[in-house]
Structure formats: structure tokens, C-alpha cells
Amino acid sequence: MKSFSSIEKGYNRQFAAAYAAYMIAGSYFYKCEAANSYEEKHLYLHYVEMPMGKQIDCEKRIDDLMQNIEYNDPEFIESISNLKCKAAFYRDGDDFIVDFRTGGFESLQVLVDAGGRCTIALSS
């Protein structure tokens, strides 16, 4: 079953990857919720239209990035595991940003390029 109307064709890789990043990176926090539930639903619709094999590949790439952070900076991962966050979604040029905001404590941003490739930026 297609989630989109006949006006929209297929899914957007960038939006689908942004939703996967929201799910996976958000799971490292104590609690994570979207700052804008409408944008979360918009990203989700693109994600569910992505073929299952591509969903798994995308999730694996993001999980590998997060595990790399966990390996290189275990203190950061431990500190965010105790924090609640709100995930804000916005554009910065051609990139789509998923910004996990904790109210002044550690923060994590996932930058998703137009091809759906992700980069993670940390700040303490």
C-alpha cells in the first residue's frame, strides 16, 4: 500500500534517512521525542516507502556511525543515555539536519545530504 497520493511519486532518500537517524540516534537518549510531530510523520512516510533492503542498509550505516562514537567516546554516550531530548528537524543549505537538543547539555546532530548519506556532529 502506498502512503502518498498519486501526486507524489516514491520517496525522498534524504527524508527517509533522516527518519532512520531520528529513530536510531534518538534511541541512545533516555527519552527522545520530536519537537514537531507533523514533520516526524512526514519523514516517516518517506521512510516506509523506502524498500525494506534499503531501510536495513540505511539503518546499518547510521548504527555503525553511532557505534563508532560509542567506541571512541563512551563518556559521551553514557552522558546522553541519562538525558531527555527533543529532536528538531530543519534544512541547512542542501543538508537536512536532525538536531537532538537536550537543553544546554550534550548535543548531537545528524546531517543528511541529498543522497541520504549521514554525518554525525557532537558537542558538549
Image (tube, rainbow, N blue to C red):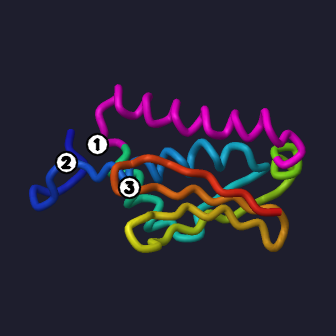
In this view, the residue in front, 45 or 69, is 69
Look at 83% across and 63% down and name the residue there. Answer: 124
Q: How far apart are the alpha carbons under marks 1 and 3?
A: 11 Å
Q: Residue furthest front?
A: 72
Identify the residue position indicated by label 2 in the image: 10
Q: Which quadrant of the figure has residue 98?
A: bottom right
Q: Amino acid at mark 3?
A: Phe
Q: Give the SS element for disc 3.
A: helix
Residue at 35% of width from left, 56% of height from top?
Answer: 114
* Magenta span: 48-76
Q: Which label number is shown at residue 107?
A: none
Mark 2 / mark 1, whichever is N-terminal:
2
Residue at the spot x=52%, y=30% of the render? 60
Tell me, yes or no, whether the highlighted magenta stretch contains residue 97. Answer: no
Whole-percent x, y for residue 117 in the image: 44, 47
Q: Quadrant of the N terminus?
A: top left
SS class, disc 2: loop
Label 1 Cα crowd, 10 Å radius (few <14 / some 14-19 / many 20+): some
Instruction: Answer whether labels 2 and 1 touch (C-beta < 8 Å).
Output: yes
Q: Is residue 83 above or below residue 91?
A: above
Q: Amino acid at mark 1?
A: Glu
Rendered image: mark on residue 49: 1
Determine whether label 1 and label 3 are within 8 Å by CB.
no
Under mark 2, the amino acid is Gly
* Residue on which the image places disc 3: 15
Residue occupying image coordinates x 82% and y 52%: 80
SS assignment at label 1: helix
